[in-house]
Image (cartoon, rainbow, N blue to C red):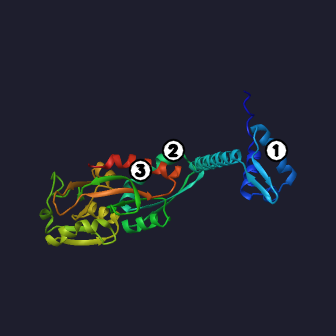
Amino acid sequence: MKLPQSIDSTALRYFQAAATACSMRRAADQLNVSPSALSRQISALEEKLGAPLFERMPRGVKLTSAGEILLFHAEQSFKELDRAQKAIAELKGLRRGQINIAIVESAARGLLPPVLAALWARHADVKVSVQVAGTYEVLRRVERGEADIGIAFNVLRETDLMVVDVARLRIGAIMSRNHELAGRKSLKVQDLVGRPVFLADSSLMLRDALADAERSWALDVRLVTNSITLMSALAATTNGIALKTKVGVSEEIERGELNFVPVDDRRLPVQHLAVVVRRNLAFPALVNTIAKECTTALSRIRED
């Protein structure tokens, strides 16, 4: 048996238009072609397939059984082509697209630089917008579509956002290398009583984690701020102690400019740094690329 020749995509488009409009003339008007040109394409299609696709009615056309089968598969084919076009557009976006990131300050300082360096090493023309904010604002921006990806602490399990990856991090005492507690392997909260302490303010999730310890012990809180950078800088240059995770100060710790001593106390819960995106959306290639780089970066700092 001789196989039919390949079907021309133009003929399929004409056929789909006629099937949808139930009229050759209306379909021709929609496609801005002459009715005779459309009729020739469909007649040629019927000849190739060896079966009539339409019943010609007094006021239009009606699909035959063969026509219904062809319409179903034609629509599936067009959907696949649309998906392919979108995928190709995403590949273009990897080369010259834009990504919007909302992130907490410590992660912006300690996590994001290697992530962006890796991105630009492969996709040099991608533009990036970074907004630094507290956890609640980071999540709000992602939920509203103002950010494509968010990186924040202690994301609630009940969130509608998709959690891509999480790193568990302990809270510790950040201090200068010359501090008298710098040589300790671990501390308790009571070891900090009577010493100047720098704490995050209520805009940061870190403050919630420290609330129980602050209430239980009369800590000498000398500074409350939403700037992790300021806390760390003061810890390096004064006899004060900043209570936070190592995120954002890892390089200073490695260079010996700061010391991190874990505070092992039930009053200080483990912190969870999460990478999140919105649910129920196509996962664009650019967001996927950034998310993978973030996962790689988290693997370097996680303590679980």
- Label 1 and label 3: CA atoms lie apart by 56 Å
Q: Is residue 287 above or below residue 198?
A: above
- Label 2 and label 3: CA atoms lie apart by 15 Å
Q: Is residue 286 left or right of residue 29?
A: left
- Which dot, 2 or 3, sits closer to the camera? 3
- For marks 1 and 2 on the same chain, the one whose residue lies earlier in the sequence: 1
| Residues at marks 1 and 2 touching, judged by CB atoms closer than 8 Å | no
List the residue tagged with mark 2: 121
Q: Quadrant of residue 27?
A: bottom right
List the residue tagged with mark 1: 43
The spot of residue 52 in percent (x, y) is: 76, 44
Circle 1: is it few (<14), some (14-19), or many (20+) Cα within 10 Å?
some
Q: Quadrant of residue 133?
A: bottom left
The residue nearer to you, when weighing 240 against 141, is: 141
Q: Amino acid at mark 3?
A: Cys
List the residue tagged with mark 3: 294
- Which dot, 1 or 3, sits closer to the camera? 1
Q: Is residue 207 visible?
A: yes
Secondary structure under tag 2 reads helix
Residue drawn where x is 37% and y is 57% of the image: 107
The residue nearer to you, when weighing 84 against 245, is: 84
- For marks 2 and 3 on the same chain, the one whose residue lies earlier in the sequence: 2
